[in-house]
Image (cartoon, grey):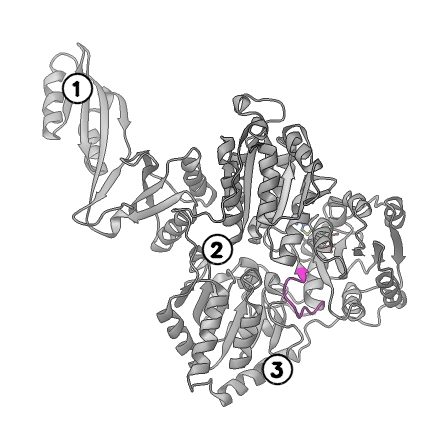
């Protein structure tokens, strides 16, 4: 099963490498990982997407909790939550192809944020699945570059990951 | 008054109650060594290799329960210490290791003797710190001791750049630190403890399986009380030996790959398994698919990540082992219920049948010295009351099988990492902590050569260790596996060109003995023990072909032991 694990950790040099090191040392997989400071500058928030059986996910959360820099964590997938990822896609956009690209982008509620006479850069936000679907809808040959931010997540309603 | 970082280092250790450290100097830590020179509260033991320093601190820690402290220089000093740090990590031993670092402005510059100590040690420490500001030094040291010694203990590295040790600031050592991200649990969940007791009291074939956590958590007394109260059989892991008196009838011996037949059979057939401070290591469980097929499992451990890691358990209890065991004893004493005597009697009958196989028997009439006989005799000659360290290999297993430890913290060995070279320096740490006790290092001619240089340290500090070298001219454990699983192709397991250990010991200023006849074993051991203030190196020329039995072969279950 795919899990989104959110982690509050001390905003210290090396904290990220402890998490990354844990995953490689124990052979857990990381699908994506994002990290940035929070409104409290002493804390960073990391969002990690991983896959595993229930037993593995249990071990992952226990091992993460054991890291001294980890203050608190939450498995978003344990309850209702919202998942978002941002993607920037640069595509070759020439002649009549430009119209078609604009249409596909609109269907996915993308925004064209940079235009040259040969390219479009499209910004798109959504779940990982939606971003995958968008890429599938594009003609592969037109894609010049894709940048994905990695997943961030937040619990719905009152449930929150905070100190 | 303002102090330099080096002075703060020394003051902090003193205020932490440290009176002995193990180390080796070098450029990056010279300010610190200078500060150590100017005081006499902290004794510094100069080993001959940084690995020796970490193992010595480790032996000190395991035998006392106090944290071991190490000081090494940057670069090669720190990398040499890594094996010792990893050894302590695998066995959850509290160490605080201070590593020198190049000055802050040179970090990342490939400076002379620079190594990324934080990066290199990260996977084998409980935590590590880089001190970037002299004003953080004292508090960081306090945190290091706090993290190393609380919860599930472990080594902590503090990396100190050289310029920090020269800078000055006001000194204040905090009495206490708290860290919002680190809150070890103490008491176990009351409901879970009750559930466990219910299960235990109803058990028909109960088994107490206890590990190093009982020793680390100073819970041997409570374990003994609980076991006696219930009348259940007890087995210890390699790391747990001494947690329950080995001479007690309820003790069925060590379990696992080279454990006793009765311990492993009882594990396999039990219906309620109470695991305490143990971690279901693969050397213990054998084939996990076949492990304890009929048992409901209670697991008490301070580390939640140990629970249900390898084996799914029914009643997890996270907490200090001693607290949980005390709570259990109290609840059982307070209730009228006791385990059913007749069912328990039947279970014991079965265990006695297994015990009667005498799985540790060996040829007592051989013309060659049997290693088991040396350990049997060592046990007798020392009245079972020595501190025994070991290296890694066959001799380690024989020591674990034949020396019956009645007290905790007397059996000191590298169980988790299995580090050859551990025995001698660890014994130094033990002896320094217990000046008047007998400290024996059981080793092999392979292992002893991995840290043999420490014989020099033993001379400098007059450490009267008794070294029992079971010299089979083979990397015996490797040879045994090659005999069993590689049709006797002894690739690189024969130890050629061995030194003359007697002369070697003598050249380091010690007493050397070589013993090659079974008839001389006892008298040699007695003679050595009588030399109270000398290190005696006993080189026992043993039967080369002897193997460690019984054995659970790879892929086997605990009920599939090969007996002699
Ligand atoms: C540092 C290290 N290197 C290699 C090994 C693998 N190993 C395990 S036991 C063993 C043989 C040990 O030989 P010896 O010390 O002579 O003891 P014996 O088994 O003969 O009693 C070896 C090489 C190890 N445990 N540690």
Callout 3 crowding tier (Cα within 10 Å): few <14, some 14–19, many ≥20 = few
Q: Residue at x 83, y 46 (%)?
A: B498
Is B112 rendered above or below residue B34? Answer: above
Callout 2 crowding tier (Cα within 10 Å): few <14, some 14–19, many ≥20 = some
Q: Residue extending furthest top? A: A117
Q: Examine the rendering and report whether any part of residue B294 can be seen.
A: no
| Element type at mark 2 | loop
Mark 2 CB lies closer than 8 A to ligand 1: no
Residue A113 numbered tag: 1
Real-space Cα separation, disc 3 to disc 2, in angstroms: 38 Å
Residue A119, position in %: x, y? 20, 14
| Chain to which the residue tagged by mark 3 belongs | B
Tag in front: 2 or 1: 2
The answer to which image quadrant residue A131 occupies is top left
Is B544 rendered above or below residue B505? Answer: below
The region drawn magenta spans: B403-411
Is B520 placed left or right of B371 in the picture? right
Is A38 placed left or right of B446 in the picture? left
Looking at this view, is B219 or B122 the one in front? B219
Is B217 placed left or right of B58 in the picture? left
Looking at this view, is A139 or A52 the one in front? A52
| Chain to which the residue tagged by mark 1 belongs | A
Residue B278, position in %: x, y? 52, 62
Looking at this view, is B260 or B219 the one in front? B219
Residue where numbered disc 3 is placed: B352
Answer with mark 3 or mark 2, whichever residue precedes in sequence.
2
Real-space Cα separation, disc 2 to disc 1, in angstroms: 52 Å
The answer to which image quadrant residue B52 occupies is top right
Residue where numbered disc 2 is placed: B151
Residue B421, position in %: x, y? 70, 48
């Amino acid at each position: 099963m795919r899990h989104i694990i959110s982690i509050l950790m001390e905003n210290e040099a090396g904290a990220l490498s402890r998490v990354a090191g844990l995953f490689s040392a124990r052979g857990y997989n990381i699908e994506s990982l994002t990290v940035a400071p929070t409104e409290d500058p002493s804390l960073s928030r990391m969002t990690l997407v991983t896959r595993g059986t229930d037993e593995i996910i249990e071990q992952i959360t226990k091992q993460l909790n054991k890291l001294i820099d980890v203050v608190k964590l939450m498995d978003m997938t344990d309850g209702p939550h919202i998942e978002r990822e941002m993607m920037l896609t640069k595509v070759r956009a020439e002649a009549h192809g430009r119209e078609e690209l604009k249409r596909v982008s609109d269907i996915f509620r993308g925004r064209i944020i940079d235009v040259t006479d040969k390219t479009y850069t499209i910004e798109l936000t959504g779940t990982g699945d939606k971003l995958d679907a968008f890429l599938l809808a594009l003609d592969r040959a037109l894609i010049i570059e894709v940048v994905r931010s990695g997943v961030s997540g937040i619990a719905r309603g009152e449930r929150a990951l905070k100190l | 008054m303002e102090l330099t970082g080096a002075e703060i280092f020394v003051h902090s250790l003193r205020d932490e109650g440290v009176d002995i450290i193990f180390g080796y100097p070098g450029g990056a830590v010279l300010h610190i060594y200078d500060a150590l020179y100017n005081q006499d509260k902290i004794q510094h033991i100069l080993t001959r290799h940084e690995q020796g320093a970490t193992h010595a601190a480790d032996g000190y820690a395991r035998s006392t329960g106090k944290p071991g402290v190490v000081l090494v220089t940057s670069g090669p000093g720190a990398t040499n210490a890594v094996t010792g740090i990893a050894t302590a990590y695998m066995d959850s031993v509290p160490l605080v290791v201070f590593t020198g670092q190049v000055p802050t402005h040179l970090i990342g510059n490939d400076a002379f003797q620079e190594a990324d100590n934080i990066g290199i040690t990260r996977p084998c420490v409980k935590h590590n710190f880089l001190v970037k500001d002299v004003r953080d030094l004292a508090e960081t040291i306090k945190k290091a001791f706090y993290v190393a010694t609380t919860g599930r203990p472990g080594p902590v590295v503090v990396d100190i750049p050289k310029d920090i040790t020269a800078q000055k600031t006001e000194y204040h050592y905090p009495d206490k630190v708290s860290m919002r991200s680190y809150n070890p649990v103490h008491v176990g969940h009351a409901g879970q403890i009750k559930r466990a007791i219910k299960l235990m009291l109803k058990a028909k074939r109960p088994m107490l399986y206890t590990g190093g956590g009982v020793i680390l958590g100073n819970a041997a007394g409570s374990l003994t009380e609980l076991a006696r109260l219930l009348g259940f059989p007890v087995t210890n892991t390699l790391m747990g030996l001494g947690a329950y008196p080995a001479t007690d009838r309820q003790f069925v011996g060590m379990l696992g790959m080279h454990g006793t037949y009765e311990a492993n059979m009882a594990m396999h057939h039990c219906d309620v398994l109470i695991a305490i401070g143990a971690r279901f290591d693969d050397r213990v469980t054998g084939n996990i698919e076949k492990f304890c097929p009929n048992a409901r499992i209670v697991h008490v451990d301070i580390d939640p990540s140990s629970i249900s890691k390898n084996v799914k358990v029914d009643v997890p209890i996270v907490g200090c082992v001693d607290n949980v065991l005390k709570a259990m004893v109290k609840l059982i004493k307070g209730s009228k219920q006791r385990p059913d005597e007749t069912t328990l009697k039947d279970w014991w009958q079965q265990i006695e049948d297994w015990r009667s196989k005498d799985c540790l028997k060996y040829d007592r009439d051989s013309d060659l010295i049997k290693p088991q006989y040396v350990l049997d005799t060592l046990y007798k000659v020392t009245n079972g009351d020595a501190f025994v360290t070991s290296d890694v290999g066959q001799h380690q297993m024989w020591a674990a099988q034949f020396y019956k430890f009645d007290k905790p913290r007397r059996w000191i060995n590298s169980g988790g990492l299995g580090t050859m070279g551990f025995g001698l320096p660890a014994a130094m740490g033990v002896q320094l902590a217990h000046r008047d006790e007998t400290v024996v290092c059981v080793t092999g001619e392979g292992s002893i050569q991995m840290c043999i240089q420490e014989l020099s340290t033993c001379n400098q500090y007059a450490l009267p260790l008794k070294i029992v070298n079971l010299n089979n001219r083979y990397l015996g454990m490797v040879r045994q596996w090659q005999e069993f699983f590689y049709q006797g192709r002894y690739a690189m397991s024969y130890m050629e060109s061995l030194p003359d250990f007697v002369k070697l010991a003598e050249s380091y200023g010690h007493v050397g003995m070589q013993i090659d006849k079974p008839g001389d074993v006892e008298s040699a051991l007695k003679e050595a023990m009588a030399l109270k203030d000398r290190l005696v190196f006993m080189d026992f020329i043993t039967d080369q072909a002897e193997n460690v039995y019984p054995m659970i072969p790879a892929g086997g279950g605990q009920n599939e032991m090969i007996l002699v």
